[in-house]
Image (cartoon, rainbow, N blue to C red):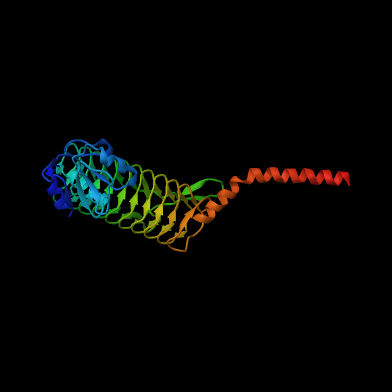
């Protein structure tokens, strides 16, 4: 991007303190500021850098107060973090790919909207429906009857199996697999397992972002559903018939077992494991490496531990656990004193 400071401030409904005519041509960290670069400051941890940064301009909150002279130009906005996100979006969208690269395969029955990009070695199966401004990067596989709505981005190496439906403004990062078979195997009398056919699909609603190397399994029957606004980190497993509620965020290496339903606006830390066939209440916040083995019915609470319990209770138990070695020593001393007392009597 290239724009003057006052033009950027106008886009963000901000006000300028300093030279508004400086031309910005790059984006940088505040601690690695560059001449003609734009940065931002929202975390107080980085406050000291505002006095020494070489960035030409810095986005800051309206109410931020400085106790020293600031030489860089400031753009004051209601929320510096959100404003900087908007700038990054503008910078990211400067490349607008369209057209079909070769070699690639598009079945004659597939329907593509306008302004679509299809990268080399992509495969689009029979009866697929691709919306307007969809970007399909190289080596993507889209199976039969797959539907992708407008403005969605599917990055390289993504595999979307037959019959799955992807909403609008979705981002799917590299090597994620959507619609692979759920893990269903019926035990037999001879000790072997018979595969249970998985004939459902996966539905990804609008404004979802899915990280790289995730697996979202198709339902046995019906649908595995990722609701609107969900954000999934890398390396996440969502099992068959699970449902992730609207605007829920999940960090890396979490696994959600089959038929488990997470509510709206949940916050799930990394490496959390969910037992199958349970329901998690709206607004639940679950700390990293927790094991969720039972239903959570009370909304908007914090949870932690294995097995998971209310966060405060879990921390209290952790403190007590740390004292166990000392307690054990005291018990041993008491036992020895008791034995000595019995012998002397």
Disc tally is: 0
User: Which residue appears at 51% of the width and 51% of the height?
Assistant: 305
In the rendered image, residue 163, in percent from the top left (x then y), is placed at 30, 53
Residue 65 visible, this orientation: yes
Nearest to the observer: residue 37 or residue 15: 15
- Residue lying farthest left? 21
From what the image shows, is residue 243 above or below residue 94?
A: below
Which of the 4 image quadrants contains residue 241?
Answer: bottom left
User: Which residue appears at 35% of the width and 42% of the height?
Assistant: 213
Nearest to the observer: residue 134 or residue 18: 18
Nearest to the observer: residue 18 or residue 88: 18
In the rendered image, residue 325, in percent from the top left (x then y), is placed at 64, 43
- Residue lying farthest bottom? 298
Which of the 4 image quadrants contains residue 136?
Answer: top left
- Residue lying farthest front? 68
In the rendered image, residue 116, in percent from the top left (x then y), is placed at 16, 47
In the rendered image, residue 243, in percent from the top left (x then y), is placed at 38, 57
Residue 126 visible, this orientation: no
User: Which residue appears at 42% of the width and 44% of the height?
Assistant: 253
The quadrant the N terminus occupies is top left
Nearest to the observer: residue 230 or residue 52: 52
């Amino acid at each position: 991007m290239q724009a003057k400071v006052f033009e950027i401030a106008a886009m963000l409904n901000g006000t300028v303190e300093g030279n508004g005519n400086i031309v910005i041509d790059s984006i940088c960290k505040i601690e690695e500021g560059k001449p003609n670069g734009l940065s931002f400051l929202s975390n107080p941890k980085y406050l000291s850098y505002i006095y020494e940064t070489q960035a030409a301009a810095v986005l800051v909150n309206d109410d931020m107060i400085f106790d020293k002279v600031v030489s860089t130009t400031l753009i004051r906005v209601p929320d510096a973090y959100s404003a900087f996100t908007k700038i990054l979006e503008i910078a990211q969208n400067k490349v607008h790919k369209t057209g079909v690269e070769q070699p690639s395969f598009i079945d004659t029955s597939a329907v593509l909207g306008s302004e679509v990009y299809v990268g080399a070695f992509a495969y689009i199966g029979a009866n697929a429906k691709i919306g307007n401004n969809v970007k399909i990067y190289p080596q993507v596989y889209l199976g039969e009857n797959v539907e992708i709505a407008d403005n969605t981005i599917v990055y390289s190496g993504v595999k979307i199996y037959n019959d799955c439906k992807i909403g609008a403004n979705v981002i799917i990062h590299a090597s994620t697999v959507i619609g692979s078979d759920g893990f269903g195997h019926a035990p037999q009398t001879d000790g072997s397992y018979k595969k249970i056919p998985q004939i459902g699909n996966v539905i990804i609603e609008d404004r979802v972002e899915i990280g790289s190397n995730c697996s979202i399994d198709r339902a046995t029957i019906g649908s595995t559903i990722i609701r609107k606004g969900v954000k999934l980190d890398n390396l996440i497993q969502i099992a068959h018939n699970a449902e992730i509620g609207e605007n829920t965020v999940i960090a890396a290496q979490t696994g959600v077992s089959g038929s488990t339903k997470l509510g709206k606006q949940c916050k799930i830390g990394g490496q959390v494991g969910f037992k199958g066939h349970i329901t998690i209440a709206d607004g639940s916040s679950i700390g990293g490496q927790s094991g969720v083995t039972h239903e959570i019915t009370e909304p908007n609470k914090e949870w932690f531990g294995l097995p998971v319990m209310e966060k405060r209770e879990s921390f209290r138990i952790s403190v007590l656990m740390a004292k166990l070695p000392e307690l054990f020593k005291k018990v041993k001393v008491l036992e020895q004193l008791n034995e000595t007392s019995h012998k002397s009597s």
